[in-house]
Image (cartoon, rainbow, N blue to C red):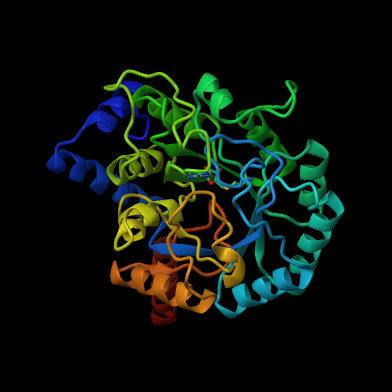
Amino acid sequence: MTALSKDEILHWLREDNPARLAELFRQADAVRRAHVGDAVHLRGLVEVSNHCVRQCMYCGLRAANRTLTRYRMSDEEIRNCARMAVLLGYGTVVLQAGEDAALTSEWVAETIHWIKQNTALAVTLSLGERTPEELRQWRNAGADRYLLRFETSDASLFDAIHPRRTSSDPRRTETLPLLKKFGYEAGGGVMVGIPGQSYESLANDVLAFRNLDLDMIGIGPYIAHPATPLGNGTLRPEIAENEQAPASKEMVYKMVALARIACPDANIPATTALATLNRTDGRRQGLRVGANVVMPNLTPREYRSHYQIYPGKACVEETAEECNRCLNGQIHSIGRVAGSGAGGRGIFPLQAVNSLHQSALVQLHGGQHER
Ligand code: SAH
């Protein structure tokens, strides 16, 4: 099942029989349990700045959106978020922002350095497309992971919704191997149901997850933002109606399940965008169909609602403590446990560790018995 063919993936993406889909989800859940265990890793998200120089057709942070109140967090505010991550027992802090030139390479390096000096947190960056020199510098400063979703593997759709700054900009699918080469754990991923995105291109996305050997895979629904060309209908990529993949929660569950089966040991979050589509159960369902990570928000409340990549974002009213309590409750309610430590790819699953302890105990016991 691991070597899913493109035809099999396409078949599952078009499947709508609930009993057969339940079988797909059951398999994905079994792969998740066998390869990454029952631990759900919590990554504390800090939305450092919503300034952005780019004009992505889907994203509310785009430079041309004048309706957005812009903010940039101070050093002390970011440090306080890192302290809170430690207090709440998280293993990782994720620094995310628009492509903001005021977040200079030196400033980012110093921020990483402070966190690594003062905490045991793993540091994940999600700062958009920056130069190879910057990416290398930040890795040298101690950053552990970098998130850079490629959004869609369909190159012409990507170019239409994600204008390049210069024609020599590398594609995100080219930067991801570079990140791995620098020693980062590299995270890619896609939005599901982008106007113009076909079922077939989603199948190619799953193959791309595998070919890129991603360490982390973020999958969420596309959510229309009225202050963007794609969201207000000004940009309408052409596609036959029966080819267009829906931006539904079911479609995201299928993609999460297929990503898990294709990439058994990757870290896969149940995303906030998924929780936005299904507030009561989106994250839990994501965790049941292959996901093993959640990203509680640590951003100070006064900034939260301004980090509006899409409207109606789940959990913007909660404090960091409330978000933590709620997510821990959700994790326990489905019989899972909060992960401890940094939770990088390839960390031994909990059950494996437990059974190792068990056999070590048996050996120890047996040894004593013999003497
Ligand atoms: N500037 C960084 C971080 C962007 S926000 C970067 O570009 O990588 C992180 C993710 O939010 C994006 O990669 C995209 O997948 C998602 N996103 C942006 N706009 C969205 C929308 N309208 N609906 C759903 N997800 C969206």
Q: Locate residue 218, reporting x and y percent.
A: 49, 46
Specify whether residue 300 is in view: no
Residue sitting at 49 percent across and 30 percent down?
Answer: 152
Quadrant, the C terminus: bottom left
Q: Is residue 103 left or right of residue 85?
A: right
In-image side of 347 versus 233 (left or right): right
| Residue 352 visible in the displayed image | yes
Q: Quadrant of the N terminus?
A: top left
Please state which of residues 233 and 358 is positioned toward the viewer in this rendering. Answer: 233
Residue found 78% across the figure and 37% down from its top:
131
Q: Which of the 4 image quarters holds residue 161?
A: top right
* Residue 153 position (above or below residue 257): above
- Of all residues, the one furthest to the front in this rendering is 67
Where 364 sits versus 173, above or below? Answer: below
The picture places residue 346, in percent across and down from the top left corner, at 53, 51
Q: Residue at x 35, y 55 (%)?
A: 33
* Front-most of residues 205 and 342: 205
Residue 66 on image: x %, y %: 63, 47
Quadrant assignment for ligand 1: top right
Q: Is 161 or 214 nearer to us in this picture?
A: 161
